[in-house]
Amino acid sequence: MSFEWYTDFVNENYKPKKSDLVCQFYFEPEKVSVKEAAGRIAAESSAGTWTTLNRVPKILKQVMATAYDIRNGHYVKVAYPLELWDEGNIPQLLSGIAGNIFGMKALKNLRLLDVSLPEIYLRHYKGPRHGIQGLRKILKVKKRPITGAVPKPKIGFSASEHADIAFETWMGGFDLTKDDENLTSTPFNRFEERVRLMTKNRQKAEKETGEKKSALLNITGPVEIMKKRAKMLHDYGWEYAMIDVVTTGCAGVQTMRDVCGDYGLAIHAHRAMHASFDRNPKHGITMLFLAKVMRAIGVDQIHVGTVVGKLVGTEQEVTDIAAEITSGKLNEKWKGNEFLHLAQNWGSIKPVLPVASGGVHPGLVPEILGILGTDIGLLVSGGIHGHPKGTRAGAKAAMQAIDAFMEGHKLEDYAKTHTELRQALGKWGRAHPE
Ligand code: CAP
Ligand code: MG
């Protein structure tokens, strides 16, 4: 049974205002018409509900979203008036455009593909504190990918073992070491002790290599704890803080953008739990959308995928996310009937460094850099610690693979004169860990 006013939220020829925030959805109606399904999406994510009402606000028309540009019976844009939004409040935005609508019985599937944030809305967000150029300045790395590694296995080492593995990673030529997403402060590896020991080992590695070294130490936790941990990182001279941005939630990340910003700390965004809502191609929220929200909030680097490694993400998805977080301006893009992204003008919001990680080893470096370019962060973790000669040799092998790519050499040729790389190829070849 169709309900009276859902289709009041549909105007197929609507021309969005400059101040409208626009979302692109994919949807599959269940027992209602395409038009009514589109109307329900716009209504239930703005001012509507399932029945007519006796009393409505005077400004109702001003706060009603409009569904328009319906394509192939499955794609619809929804334009949201600016009046709907609490400036600078991402949780409120998500409660609107990514809230109840995913649970409507009238839809078999619903996927939020992308959002276009108007300048007048975006101006309430800080964006990255440092951005790509700022990170390169911190690490004194001009052109090649910024490299990093997580001690593996991901958890179980004591703070001093962790700091020793970090030292080996730095001595192998890497810029960064990183805590794993599930390592914060455990009985066998307390955050505070880890920070102290890492600080000592960093100084030693910088002295011995003459290179700048840093680390992505995981401060994830309740906000007050994150604030304390960020202060400690600042007090011990670190340049980054790592946050599991999905499990922390946007409110926590927004608060920590302010706190870390005041300390001059760059934010490394790990996206653990993202695949629980972005993997199903017909339902949920895309990683592209999540990455855009995190750019607006202001993380400095975020995981985007590798295409060829152990975790999901097609070449189209991964390269579109990378383009979205690094570009100043993008135009709307469809590939045939397939929607890719909405137009977006990022204005003065800095670019975010795309991070490729997950099953990476030296043999995969040419493919990944071939797909994503070299202006990325490259995390090679199991892929260095699993090297036949250990962590330091593994890091050297990965750096050699990067040099080979930067200088235009074929990996196998370069390996003839570079032992560690030859040993790595001996173990993994160019295998795609799946
Ligand atoms: C990679 C990793 C990262 C994933 C995250 C892991 O380790 O530390 O958390 O890359 O996924 O725990 O699996 P390996 P994504 O290099 O040893 O595989 O980058 O897709 O967000
Ligand atoms: Mg991990």
Image (cartoon, rainbow, N blue to C red):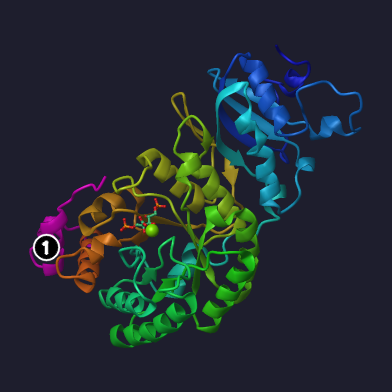
Q: Residue at x 54, y 43 (%)?
A: 289
Q: Amino acid at mark 1?
A: Arg
Residue 143 x/y as whole percent: 35, 65
Camera-side residue of 373 and 382: 382
Q: Is residue 307 above or below residue 143?
A: above
The answer, for residue 348, to whether it is visible in the render is: no
Residue 193 x/y as whole percent: 45, 81
Q: Is residue 103 above or below residue 312?
A: above
Q: Residues within 10 Å of mark 1 (few under 14, many from 20)?
A: many
Q: Is residue 384 found inside the magenta-colored segment of the image?
A: no
| Residue lying furthest front | 187
The answer, for residue 240, to whether it is visible in the render is: yes
Ligand 1 positioned in quadrant: bottom left
Q: Residue at x 13, y 57 (%)?
A: 427
For the C terminus, give its image quadrant.
Answer: top left
Return the residue at label 1: 422
Q: Secondary structure at mark 1?
A: helix
Where on the picture, by quarter, is residue 404? bottom left
Q: Residue at x 40, y 63 (%)?
A: 180
Q: Residue at x 58, y 78 (%)?
A: 231
Numbered label tally: 1
Residue 262 x/y as whole percent: 63, 73
Query: In this rendering, would 83 be left or right of 73?
Result: right
For the N terminus, give its image quadrant.
Answer: top right
Q: Is residue 274 above or below residue 37?
A: below
The magenta-colored residue range is 407-434
Query: In this rendering, would 35 be left or right of 218?
Result: right
| Residue lying furthest left | 416
